[in-house]
Amino acid sequence: MVKPEVYKSLGLNDNEYQKILDILKREPTPTELAMFSVEWSEHCGYTRSRNWLKLLPKKGKYKSLIGEDSGGIIVDDLAVIFKMESHNHPSQVEPKQGAATGVGGIIRDIFTAGARPIASLNSLRFGSLTQTYNRYLLRGVVDGIQFYGNCVGVPTVGGEIYFDESYTGNCLVNVMCIGVAKKTKLARARATGYGNSIMYVGSSTGRDGIGGCSVLASHEFKESEEKRPAVQIGDPFTEKCLIEATLEALATGYVIGIKDMGAAGITCSTSEMASAGNSGMEVDIARVPRRESNMQPWEVMMSESQERMLVCVKKGKEKEIERIFSKWDLNAVVIGKVTDDGVVRIKDKGKIVAEIKAHSLTQSPVYDMPYKKPNYLDRLNKLDINKIPEPKNYNETLLKLLSSPSICSKKWVYEQYDHMVQTNTAVLPGSDASVLRLKGTNKALAATADCNSRYCFLNPYRGAQIAVAEAARNLVCSGAQAAAVTDCLNFGNPEKPDRFWQFKNCMEGIADACKFFDIPVVSGNVSFYNESPKGAIHPTPAIGMIGVINDIKKVCTQYFKKENEIIILLGSSKEELGGSEYLKVIHGLIKGDAPQLDLRLERAVQQTAQEAIKKGLASSAHDCSEGGLAVTLAECCISNNDNVMGALIDNLDFIGRKDTALFGESQSRIVISCNKKSAGKIRAIAQNFAAPFRIIGTTGGKNLKISSGKNVLINLPIKRILDKWTNSLQSLITA
Amino acid sequence: MKFGVVVFPGSNCDRDCFYTVKNVLKQPVKYIWHKQTKLDDIDCAILPGGFSYGDYLRTGAIARFSPLMKQIYRFAQKGGLVIGICNGFQILLEAGLLPGAMLRNKNLHFICKYVYIKTETNKTPFTNFCSRNQILKIPIAHNEGNYYIDKSGLKTLEENRQIVFRYCSQDGAVNNQSNPNGALANIAGIINKNGNVLGMMPHPERSSEKILGSEDGFLIFKSIAAWLNPKI
Amino acid sequence: MLNVEIYITLKKTVSDPQGLTIKHALESLGYQNLQEVRVGKLVTITLNSEDKKKAKQKINEMCRKLLANLIIEDYSFRIKEV
């Protein structure tokens, strides 16, 4: 008789346990109980989110591919596969290994689809750097990403880092990987064909991270110290060998299906591969290569040892596969075979330790969670900007914003990442989006990860829409057309109705914005229970977006190129300050509503910029986001280290308060620079798309000068701006 | 002329070097697996960057015992051209084909960025397409690029003009500010006494195409090609 | 069986930025009178052998050949019977 405290400690409730009894018509064995607990957890089974994930569009301009563990799009004869995934809780406990294994896991999801990983991005969130532990977390996470990513030879080309108190006690580490394959060479994560062999490949199995997935990912954090043993250790060298061996093995045509052993290792991979293939599977875990002695069957089943995969191989071709893996000094062992009775049968030295219908494991219960708008929101949304004092010194305000860790240069971080290996990175980190050329074609991909979670906190629906709009805007600024999304949905405890309301509204926001822009969501990940004793994190639906650049020669970057060029603002500034970095950094307020968003205006602005870049008219294009127009202009001046230059901005449209025009975060704005001849042509394009267009100044000089009539608001030497922006992060970290 | 790119487990710039030779330099090239006991018919061996054997123990320490390294040694003795880039340089040091050793970067971080290097001599098979003192914009990406050699070793290097590249500023100043990793005497690349084995930390294959931000690294590939076949 | 502990450290003449950083960190935690901090590696090897003299010779060889780079590193070791 299994005691309630046992199944409860595994994360199963009374109803779920009863359901297991009904399915099996007997008591579960310890191994079976462990298997159900994992497959029915939110992490694997999407039990609480699934009803809302259905809202997301699956089709767009490019043909989309939805695989078992990742998704992508077809670009000509190539498949571009990508996915973003969270590794928040492991990173909060042990930042270096947590982040490292996050990178390793997402890379495996890509190459098990048959695609060679060509780039990684990440989206990170930490609490304030004034706290020692948060600094430790940032340093550790960056160290983990560089340790794994650099060695494995996949460039880390971009991402975002934000800081907010809500992440103290629960940092976010979301990692995204992009891979490319010939579209005819994709692999699936399923087992089919009676009698075909099931092989275990990669590293040996130890007790790493046992229960990590259900215990770590499904409970709120209380005492992270105690959970240390569940941390897995990453081995990027083995992973690099695994990439090469796997791609070599897939090229033989003898591999029917392949799956990473990620969360809950062999449990997930056996049941999900059998279920996806509508077949059964029989494996003997006594044959699993181990590096620790006396492991219990359930421990072998639950182990989250890294760099392992399960492969379904054509009967009779096992030796060929073994030969390839042993060339790379990797294990490749037959541990079982495909059956046709739909049952996952796990044996230990011939003795059955688990016997469950594959579908009953993967068809996890789905819950309709109650939701309710949080009580605090109406109060927070009320912002009377007349009560906010206007800055006395705009120079100081701008410098303060530029040194805010969420805005300042992330060079200290990305220079620790190898962002150039594979020689595809055409736009290096530090511009709106990273650009990767596609070797052998005239095309390139642009990639970005975006989310302003403060907007999502103040207005989840619009905040999520803005995340999609901004990601698309970033891609457009690099010369790309937005093509597809992977989302990493980080939220608090879904059992609390106010948290679930945030989730529900964000899902609706993403769905509506993606449908409007005709962008499918092809893959993603849900991470709930991101809470510390102080409360939930800000809702953070990180949007990873991929765009396609049809002509690699038409790539654009954010920084000014030449002196005496025209500076144009597409879009218009509204008198709004809600949720801005300015309000937080300068006035200490997280208040107001998220910026307004008119999707049609957004589209008009994006189409204008896209057309201008495509026609070769724009020298630079930069999205206007956190910190507002003043920060955007400063970044245009300083973000090319080899060639910084000033700008004279003397024709801004100040409709109301000056701080709203300079630091407000109105959406749908892009700053473009171009030569004098092109300005008229861009104006015509803007008129055609009905996008607001205004020439606001010229590039050149050694200062950034912004004036309103005769009133000079900002006048700062570029050198000073550059110093503040470049060195702030490092000095905060090493404080 | 034929190029061979050596592949160790953990090499991760092998495909980049291969691509540069094949698609940019447009010369024949093949991969050479580290377990091979015979070196194919090649004119220039490239030891690429990466993390051979995970950089476990010390960078390059395990790779140098690969069966192929004996052949590389023999090939070098006979005057064959060998270029080690980044991890390849570290392997050449461990193998004793070049003098000195690598320490961790002074700031204790991996550093990936564009730097400038000064071509100290163009009288080598690897730099004959450069002008003397030419400044090249070329990226580095390493954890252990802090070159070390004892005093007498440095003296020998200087006297024999074996220092091929030094880190410098955009306008050519060789000093502490322009030294990214703490390397002794700003050394970024050295050559053996016989002048046929070059090791360099910066990555020429990452700066051989305009689309990547610099074509300066391509001068090194062109130099090798010109040396091997003066007619082209 | 013999249990061997091999210590590999940077030579005294080679600067050790890791050691310096740790020294600085310790000092900022209030630990004083630190003359020097240096970081090294510990390699443990269990040998299926009882012959200490032979083992010593073998370990020396391993160190020179692979475990230490004598240009920048020194090594020392301890052999214990288990």
Image (spheres, coloured by chain):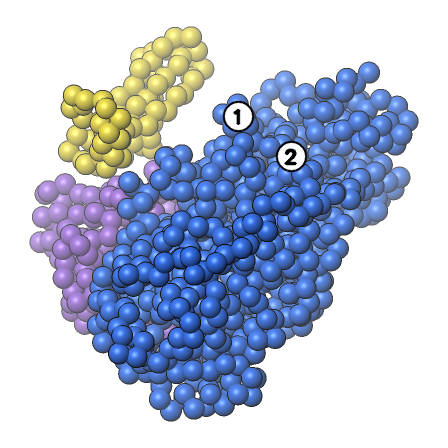
**Colour chosen for chain C:** yellow
Quadrant for the N terminus of chain B, please: bottom left
Kindly state the secondary structure of the residue where label 2 is placed. loop
Label 1 marks a residue whose chain is A
- In the picture, which chain is purple? B
Q: Is residue A66 left or right of residue A248?
A: right
* Residue at x-position 56% and y-position 78%: A604
Mark 1 is surrounded, within 10 Å at the Cα level, by few (under 14), some (14 to 19) or many (20 or more) other residues, namely few
Q: Earlier in the sequence, mark 2 or mark 1?
A: 2
Front-most of A424 and A687? A687
Q: Residue at x 68, y 58 (%)?
A: A508
- The residue located at (29%, 63%) in the rendering is A394
Q: What chain is colored blue?
A: A
Q: Does any portion of residue A143 appear in the rendered image?
A: no
Relative to A16, is A591 above or below? below
Residue A459 visible in this rendered orientation of the protein: yes
The C terminus of chain B sits in image quarter: bottom left
Q: Name the foreground residue: B74 vs B135.
A: B135
* Residue denoted by label 1: A223
Have a look at marks 2 and 1 and say if they share a chain: yes
Q: Which residue is mark 2?
A: A218
Give the SS element for disc 1.
loop
